[in-house]
Amino acid sequence: MKPTITAFERSPDRGRGLARDMRVRWALEEVGQPYDVRLVSFKEMKESAHRKRHPFGQIPTYEEGDLTLFESGAIIFHIAERHPGLLPDDSNARARAITWMFAALSTVEPPIVERSMAILLERDKSWHKERLPMLEDRVQVRLGELSSRLGNGDWLDGAFSAGDLLMVTVLRRLDGSGLVEKYSNLAAYVARGEARPAYQRAFAAQLAVFTGKPPTG
Ligand code: GTB
């Protein structure tokens, strides 16, 4: 059954693929699953029809028959469980890939989001200039640790997995900050993810929502 996901009607990132529908689109493209998109405005996101899909009034959501999911990590885990290609068959390797999914979402993403929110929402506060270096330090610590673990590897644990998909999308949230570029292996890792044909298709699809023009290529 063809799933339907939700995405911003007009993404504040102006089509840079930083909103969390991008990771769901990418996962669906990786496994070759066609999907429909329901675009929602900021107003619609907070209305009861959408809150039935998402208790916190956010995107993305995922509907497939009588199943409705929210939380990008849970959606990607569901896709990865239902289709080959995003999680290894070997049970230990699979458990490690799932560990990387959690690491991306609960260890690496929080300090990155905290920094972004401070830049977006706290610029006019008297303490902003003092707080920002502290938030950047926390991000740097995680990037340094991740860089050490990745080393010369192409991916975090053997073949590309849902763990890499999530980690790359999390690191992309630092786009334009110059922070990832301080670690050449992490910059190459993100570029490797972005070069995947499935990523490119997903990126083109979300960009087309913003430009109003159909995806090219
Ligand atoms: N934990 C949830 C998940 O992983 O699915 C978080 C979902 C979430 O934060 N959704 C955001 C949302 O719906 C969109 S992705 N926000 C509206 C609201 O809360 O009212 C976050 C996001 C938004 C914008 C940018 N940007 O412009 O660069 C990047 C990321």
Image: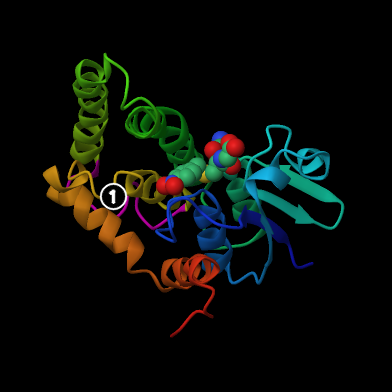
Left or right relative to 131: residue 198: right
Q: Quadrant of the C terminus?
A: bottom left
- Amino acid identity at mark 1: Asp
Name the residue: 38% across, 69% down: 196
Task: State the scheme by which the image is colored.
Answer: rainbow
Instruction: Report crowding for label 1: few under 14, some 14 to 19, many 20 or more residues within 10 A (C-alpha).
Output: few
Q: Is residue 9 visible?
A: yes
Q: Is residue 176 magenta?
A: no
Report x, y in % for residue 79: 63, 55
Left or right relative to 76: residue 190: left
Q: Is residue 154 visible?
A: no
Depth check, front residue: 33 or 80: 33
Is the residue indicated by label 1 positioned so its CB lies within 8 Å of ligand 1?
Answer: no
Considering the whole magenta stretch, tell me its main secondary structure. loop
Report x, y in % for residue 210: 50, 65
Q: Quadrant of the N terminus?
A: bottom right
Bounds of the magenta span? 150-161
Read off the residue under disc 1.
175
Report x, y in % for residue 58: 64, 40
Name the residue: 40% across, 29% down: 121
Report x, y in % for residue 159: 38, 57
Question: Which quarter of the figure has residue 33?
Answer: bottom right
Depth check, front residue: 109 or 136: 136
Depth check, front residue: 48 or 167: 48
